[in-house]
Amino acid sequence: MFGNIRIIAFTVGCHFLLASNLFAAKPPLNSAQLIEESDLVIVAQIINLEIRIERSHIECGFGNYDWAIDLTLKITEVEKGLFEKSDTIIARCFRIKTRKSMLECFSPNGNYPIPPVDTSVRAHLYKDNGLWRVVLPNGLVSLSTHVESAHAEVERQLSSKRFTYLLPLELWLLILVFAVLVVVIVMIIRLLRRRRLRRNIATSETNAS
């Protein structure tokens, strides 16, 4: 039994070590690739940034959540596509917040970098269900320097807890199977002890008579 406990502990450790690298970083795209992936390319200034939680649009199953980062961009130039509604546009980035299982950690982990407010950027956007999203992973290209403290604050707000239910779903299933086995073994041991006790009692009564 203690050997099995060591196996469980080792598996837990491996899961956490792997998890630090599993939120897969999609390789950065070059300029030509970014333009090809985009429906709209604009030069703009970030004038507002809002962070909220949304269900993952990539891993759509239950228990998968992302940070949704809505950037309000003030457009100064349109380099590809058409956008004539106004001089501002809301574009959504995302970062993984939590995933429920190890397998779902292999999906793209979001947009990098996400510059802070007041940064001038070249934004590569695509339309998705009526929403403008930033091309993964590096669809926001900074055109101006930004204050590192402001960038660090944005990154601090986008921290990830890795797994929605503390441990990955696969590990919970493994723990459940182990717990059931332990319960079955304990019940069998108790049953055998009771039978042995009854047998000893019956033998004692026979000898006494």
Image: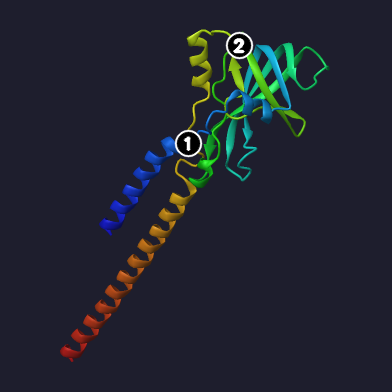
Residue 4 vertical position relative to residue 59 in the rendered view, above or below: below
Q: Disc number at residue 162?
A: 1
- Please, what is the three-letter code of the amino acid marked with disc 2? Val
- Please, what is the three-letter code of the amino acid marked with disc 1? Arg
Residue occupied by mark 2: 117
Q: Earlier in the sequence, mark 2 or mark 1?
A: 2
Q: Position of residue 177 (x, y in %)?
A: 42, 59
Judged from this view, the residue extending furthest toward the front is 32
Residue 12 vertical position relative to residue 108 in the rendered view, above or below: below
What residue sits 49% from the left and 42% below the top?
165
Foreground pick, 100 / 138: 138
What residue sits 62% from the left and 29% below the top?
33
Query: Which label sits in the foreground, 2 or 1?
Result: 2
Q: Disc number at residue 197?
A: none
What residue sits 58% from the left and 36% below the top?
65
| Classed neighbour count for the residue bearing mark 2: other residues with Cα under 10 Å, few (<14), some (14–19), many (≥20) | some
What residue sits 29% from the left and 78% below the top?
195
Asked if labels 1 and 2 touch by Cβ distance under 8 angstroms, the answer is no
Residue 48 vertical position relative to residue 58 in the rendered view, above or below: above
Quadrant of the image occupied by residue 117: top right
Foreground pick, 87 / 50: 87
Label 2: which secondary element: loop
